[in-house]
Amino acid sequence: MEDIIAMYDDKVEFDSDEVGIHKVKMKDIKELRTKDIMQLRFLDGTIIEGHIIITEDSVYTMENPGQTFPREELLSITPSEKSGESLWAGEISAGLNFKSGNTESFDYYFDAEVRYLRSTGRFISTYRGVFEKVRDKTTDTVVTTEDNHRFTAKYDYYYSKKLFLTLPSYDLVVDTFRNIRYQTSLGVAAGYEVIDIKGMDLEVYAGPSVQATHFETVEPGEDEVVYSPVLAFGFDFEVDLTSDIEYFLVYDAKLVNEESGLYIQRTETGFEIELIDDFDLEITAVIDNTLEPVADENGIKPEATDILFTIGIEYEF
């Protein structure tokens, strides 16, 4: 049996007893019936609720079969509060490594995403944290070699099947080894689905924001807190290599002032391999780059590029 989680961007997300959570493009579905009460939104802003029946050319509810809507006008499907089903969905992944010998090292990462689903749009919040400590057995000294955290939150409003507006978006970055005590940004953006074919999707976005960076230390005479206008842009690409393996590439960039680093980039790429039910194996590379890193109080600039590889288990709910 399959339960519908939601439908956005003409893609229906199902939770199946056999294969776990997966997505199917709406154009590949000939007919659809829901066992729970769902909420539907159409391009003209009309919202209806009920047990939904979708045929090849029309949409209607079991409660009111005489009122039909054109299938091509359907914009989104989400659970109704009347159904008793959760309006929340998401995934959690984690990885852990331990090494012993001449040196002992312990590192872990934790990644989470939660989504609140409504027919008008969806709220998405993400968190990624990476931590590593190394102990030298000879000197018995412990050194932290990695400690960074990133939190994001945004609300996507679907204006049409292809166009969405992010109103607003918020980012928080904490990364001591890049001389960032914390960095926050708040902005808006417009996004568009460029590619939507079987097994492949590409979305692009761009928009303005403002950013505040609090540095750990700075050279004498420099400001520890720097503000900057931002032009943010990027893309999100996914392709199904097989029925069980998905490749993803996410690129985010910010054009900022010279005091903030000029050009800040972040790339996440890797594979999700379906294991059993709602569990996936996730292999990810994360590349962070700042064109002009800000020097610390000793005049030493952090490395411009950080590269992180992680392997972990992801659970979808």
Image (cartoon, rainbow, N blue to C red):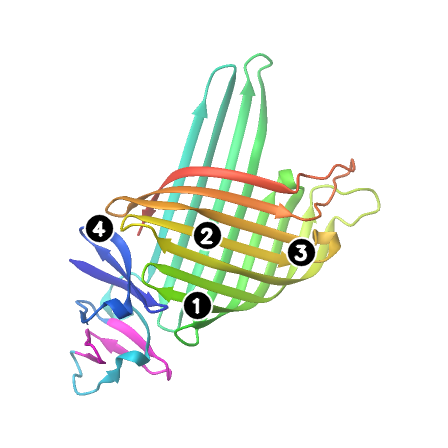
Q: Which mark is residue 212?
A: 3
> Which residue is outermost to the top?
138
- Disc 1 target residue: 193
Relative vertical location of residue 8 with respect to residue 282 in this rendering, above or below: below
Question: CB of mark 3 within 8 Å of CB of mark 2?
Answer: no
Kind of residue at disc 1 = Glu
- Disc 4 target residue: 19
Given this view, does label 3 or label 2 mark the residue nearer the observer? Answer: 2
Picture quadrant where residue 301 is located? top right
Question: CB of mark 2 within 8 Å of CB of mark 4?
Answer: no
> Which residue is outermost to the right?
221
**The magenta stretch spans which residues?**
38-61
What residue is rendered at 16% in x and 80% in y? Answer: 63
Distance between the alpha carbons at the discs numbered 3 and 1: 30 Å
Whether residue 171 is visible, yes or no, is yes
Distance between the alpha carbons at the discs numbered 4 and 1: 27 Å
